[in-house]
Image: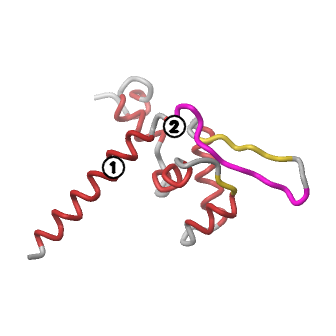
Amino acid sequence: MKEDTELFGICPYVTSQKVLTGKWSLLILYHLSNGPVRFNELQRRLPHLTQATLSKQLKGLEGNGLVVRKEYQQLPPKVEYSLSSIGQRFQVVLDSLETWGHEYMDYMEEQQK
């Protein structure tokens, strides 16, 4: 069997997994799905992430083409993050994950009875 690195760009599952690496990628994409968000606002929405971790995750998502970083030339500096066009197409996946997540939580509740 081919190594994962050899399957990147060939196998849709390997490609998706590599592009969405990072523990917080899905939550960041979710928070950006309703429009542009400034870095500090993202940090407030995700208080358990350090500034360094959030920055690293955003750079990774930007590098993979899912997120766009817009820097405004003003004082104080202002930076906004938003989903790119391919990132916006991920919305259907986020919606499906939300539906499945609710179904799984219902399943877990039933298992505890």
76 displayed left or right of 86:
right
66 displayed left or right of 106:
right
Corner quadrant of residue 67: top right
Q: Position of residue 13 (x, y in %)?
A: 34, 34
Q: Residues within 10 Å of mark 2 (few under 14, many from 20)?
A: some
Task: Find disc 2 in the rendering and name its residue.
Answer: 88
Q: Residues within 10 Å of mark 1 (few under 14, many from 20)?
A: few
Q: Position of residue 84 (x, y in %)?
A: 59, 36
Give the colour scheme of this rendering: secondary structure
Please name the residue shown 40% across and 41% down the image. 17
In this view of the protein, which residue sits in the foreground, 64 or 89? Answer: 89
Q: Position of residue 34 (x, y in %)?
A: 54, 49
Which secondary structure lies at badge 2? helix
Residue type marked 2: Gln
Please name the residue shown 44% across and 25% down the image. 9
* Mark 2 or mark 1, earlier in chain: 2
> In the rendered structure, which segment of residues is drawn in magenta?
75-86
Q: Position of residue 11 (x, y in %)?
A: 35, 27
- Mark 2 → mark 1, Cα distance in angstroms: 15 Å
Which secondary structure lies at badge 1? helix
**Quadrant including the C terminus:** bottom left
Task: Find disc 1 in the rendering and name its residue.
Answer: 97
Is residue 108 part of the magenta span, yes or no? no
